[in-house]
Image (cartoon, grey):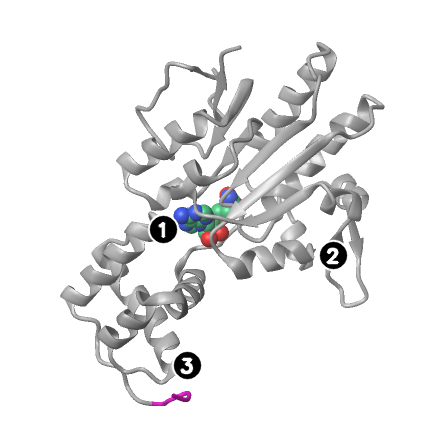
Amino acid sequence: MGWSLRTIADLSDAEFGQWATLLEERAGIHLSFPQKSLLQSQLSIRMRELGYDSYAEYYSLVTDGLQGRLEWSILIDRIAVKETSFFRHRASFEFVRRLLQDKINNQQLTESFDVWSVGCSTGEEPYSLAMVINDCFELAQLEPYYGVTALDISSTALAKGRLGRYLPRSLENMTGEESKRYCTLCSDGSYEVVRKLRDRVCLTHGNVLQIQDMPAVQMDVIFCQNLLVYFRRWLRRDILNSLVDRLKPGGALIIGVGEVVEWDHPRLQRVANEEVQAYVRHQ
Ligand SMILES: C[S@@+](CC[C@H](N)C(=O)[O-])C[C@H]1O[C@@H](n2cnc3c(N)ncnc32)[C@H](O)[C@@H]1O
């Protein structure tokens, strides 16, 4: 079936319900009714590319076998909101800096400093984390010993992140010093994150709903911002509870301010700082 100019009918309420359920079951993303036209436009663009004009037939494709899995990965890529930037919420990154500096100053850093960026999109967040971490090691004149694992459900976002090249406007929140130290101007006018940071950041495909199936590594920092906001409240709490198991004692979970309310955990202490929403695991 080739690309087609055929008009695709409006998504009915029942069809919207079916697609919204699939999206929520598989990715956690909760679409409410006002987002119907957004979903419809993404579905119809993709259906036109494939020559489909029936939502039901396209639904069968997405939910069937290996080809369905491939098609799902393309579709989720189109639907997920991937907006991000370097140092999107500066205070959260500065919190990581202080945490690591304290560990270094108190000689508590006995092993690699391991960080997880959950819902990392195109890489600006994990690279920003690598910048503050590298700063701390260099300031203390220590050999950098850290790793940032970055996870996302979108393959195209990850591919862009692995490239590590960004338009000048993506660097807007960086200080002049940061961009000078950590980015190189390329001949096409884009900026490339320096190799020493790219070597420390590993961008991997994964679904935050399946954390229990991922290798049971323990982290010093779990950074999860602007992802949970797309999920229902009960799911946000479930995911946070599963992330707690992945924290080293003394490790910190940092989420977007206000993304989760009325949640606490017996193994965590909320950090008294209004600028960030961070929790530290008891020793
Ligand atoms: C709005 S971006 C946030 C990026 C970054 N954390 C920030 O704060 O700038 C949300 C990211 O979460 C990803 N995402 C959505 N559902 C996901 C899931 N179930 N598992 C993993 N990543 C997911 C999207 O693909 C998108 O890249």
Residue that label 3 marks: 49
User: Which residue corresponds to the image point at 61% horizontal and 59% vertical from the top-left?
Assistant: 160
User: Which residue corresponds to the image point at 70% horizontal and 19% vertical from the top-left?
Assistant: 101
Foreground label between 2 and 3: 3
Residue that label 1 marks: 27
| Magenta-colored span | 1-5
Residue 87 visible in the current orientation: no
The local secondary structure at tag 3 comes to helix
Q: Main secondary structure of the magenta part?
A: loop
- Residue sitting at the far right: 141
Q: Quadrant of residue 233?
A: top left
Kindly identify which numbered label has been placed on residue 11.
none
How busy is the neighbourhood of tag 2: few (under 14 within 10 Å), some, or many (20 plus)?
Answer: many
Name which residue type carries label 1. Answer: Ala
Q: Position of residue 9 (x, y in %)?
A: 22, 80
Residue that label 2 marks: 191
